[in-house]
């Protein structure tokens, strides 16, 4: 009788203990916001770079292409580093590296410097992204989609506040000083935040949310290794989906501002397109993450790619400010399901045993798309003076992605699907 009372009291203590996983979600949200500002503001610097150096859009887009391509390689490396070393150490080092990258960007005078600083140094500093998202999958079994969505809201916030802030800094100071200010701010936020990160619940003496405290490690240990995942059709379908998703979205982030300016919008109004896109994506990642938990990941992916196709068809006829803002709304809605559910989908299909590395390797397919998208759009514009062929191709790719989503089926014998 006494033992039963002691057990009941212990269970009550465990239930009332604050779950550190919520701190992890908040920290990942903050860090993702800061690191993705570096990606989202690049298009804002097109005009100043063209004005000062007379570089073509293809040349400037090439640095973005290199950034995204090396990002795909670096996310695999950083995921491996976080498995071998401390998550705090790697994230903190990336925070310092991001500040250094911004400082070097403020000093550029030639194309090779642009490609080295933005294409490689800043690329590596942002590559910690997959390891951070994978960390949330380790902390949550239930509510995984919702919590991943909350963390991914940081990307939406970056797109919402980053472009207007960058545009204001450039207008108030100049583009070089803007990079300096952004670099200082990034380092002093990321490094302290990294000190509070914990990779696994066991490091806090807790169990993943939604698991039994008697077997806290069972979900982390289940799953397949990367070599096994590479032999499945599911993995390559996810790679194709990732490729199309980032080909289209990064293309927009890099080129939509200067496209809107070419249609007659002033720079501030053009930057607001990205701000609206970012704001809507904050709402979208949370709604889509919750919907993925309730209805499954694949139906939400199909809906998201349909919205992506609609957004690019609409962009073909959008010339007025309100039409471009409506495009940003539709694109932002499409963003949520595709971005937030990749990590839960990989966990659902392949388990958590090698989740970070599998997700990072699949994301390399997306990185190739992210590299090719802006470069392709810049080349097409330089050749024919229009983005319309690019917009048509993006719409068609989104329709193809719907088909890929419908072909994605659960793996036979999967015993670790989300609870």
Image (cartoon, rainbow, N blue to C red):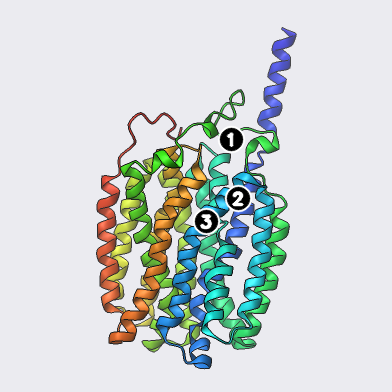
Q: What element carries label 3?
A: helix
Q: Residue 98 carries which label?
A: none
Indicate which label's residue lies in the foreground, 2 or 1: 2
Query: x%, y% of residue 241?
Result: 34, 55
Q: In which quarter of the image is the N terminus?
A: top right
Give SS at disc 1.
loop
Name the residue rendered at 32%, 49% in the picture.
237
| Disc 2 secondary structure class | helix
For label 3, the residue is 75
Do residues under tags 2 and 1 come within 8 Å of each other at their CB atoms? no
Q: How far apart are marks 3 and 1 (CA)?
A: 24 Å
Is 222 above or below relative to 200? above
Mark nearer the viewer, 3 or 1: 3
On screen, residue 380 above or below 50 = above
Quadrant housing residue 83: top right
> Contact, CB < 8 Å: mark 3 with mark 1?
no
Residue 54 lies, in percent from the top left, at 47, 92
Question: Where's residue 72, x and y in %?
Answer: 47, 59
**Residue at numbered disc 1:** 208
> Badge 3: how crowded within 10 Å, few (<14), some, or many (20+)?
many
Cα gap from disc 2 to disc 1, whole angstroms: 22 Å
Q: Earlier in the sequence, mark 2 or mark 3?
A: 3
- In the rendered structure, the answer to whether residue 292 lies left or right of residue 36 reads left
Asked if marks 2 and 3 touch (Cβ < 8 Å), the reply is no
Specify the quadrant of the image occupied by residue 92.
bottom right
Residue 35 % position (x, y) = 59, 64
């Amino acid at each position: 009788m006494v033992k039963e009372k002691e057990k009941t009291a212990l269970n009550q203590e465990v239930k009332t203990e604050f779950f550190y996983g919520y701190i992890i979600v908040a920290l990942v949200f903050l860090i993702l916001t800061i690191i993705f500002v570096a990606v989202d503001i690049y298009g804002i610097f097109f005009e100043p770079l063209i004005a000062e150096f007379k570089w073509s859009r293809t040349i400037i887009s090439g640095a973005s292409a290199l950034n995204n391509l090396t990002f795909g390689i670096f996310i695999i490396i950083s995921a491996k580093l976080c498995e071998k070393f401390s998550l705090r150490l790697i994230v903190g080092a990336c925070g310092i590296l991001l500040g250094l990258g911004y400082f070097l960007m403020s000093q550029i005078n030639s194309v090779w410097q642009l490609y080295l600083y933005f294409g490689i140094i800043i690329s590596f500093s942002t590559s910690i992204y997959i390891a951070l998202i994978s960390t949330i999958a380790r902390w949550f079994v239930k509510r995984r989609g919702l919590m991943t969505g909350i963390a991914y809201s940081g990307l939406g916030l970056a797109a919402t506040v980053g472009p207007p802030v960058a545009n204001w800094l450039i207008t108030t100071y100049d583009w070089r000083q803007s990079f300096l200010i952004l670099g200082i701010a990034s380092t002093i936020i990321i490094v302290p935040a990294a000190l509070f990160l914990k990779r696994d619940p066991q490091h806090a003496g807790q169990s993943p949310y939604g698991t039994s405290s008697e077997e806290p490690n069972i979900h982390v240990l289940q799953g397949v290794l990367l070599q096994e995942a590479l032999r499945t059709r599911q993995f390559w379908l996810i790679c194709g989906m990732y490729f199309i998703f980032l080909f289209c979205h990064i293309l927009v982030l890099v080129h939509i501002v200067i496209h809107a300016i070419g249609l007659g919008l002033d720079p501030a109004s053009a930057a607001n397109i990205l701000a609206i896109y970012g704001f809507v994506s904050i709402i979208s990642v949370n709604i889509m993450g919750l919907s993925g938990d309730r209805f499954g990941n694949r139906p939400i992916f199909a809906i998201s790619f349909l919205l992506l196709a609609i957004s690019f068809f609409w962009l073909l006829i959008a010339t007025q400010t309100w039409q471009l803002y409506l495009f940003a709304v539709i694109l932002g809605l499409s963003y949520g399901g595709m971005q937030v559910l990749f990590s839960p989908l990989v966990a659902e299909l392949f388990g958590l045993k090698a989740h970070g590395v599998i997700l990072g390797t699949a994301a390399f397919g997306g990185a190739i798309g992210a590299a090719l998208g802006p470069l392709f759009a810049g080349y097409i514009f330089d050749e024919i003076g229009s983005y319309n062929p690019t917009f048509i191709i993006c719409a068609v790719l989104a329709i193809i992605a719907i088909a890929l989503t419908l072909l994605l089926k659960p793996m036979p014998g999967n015993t670790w699907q989300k609870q």
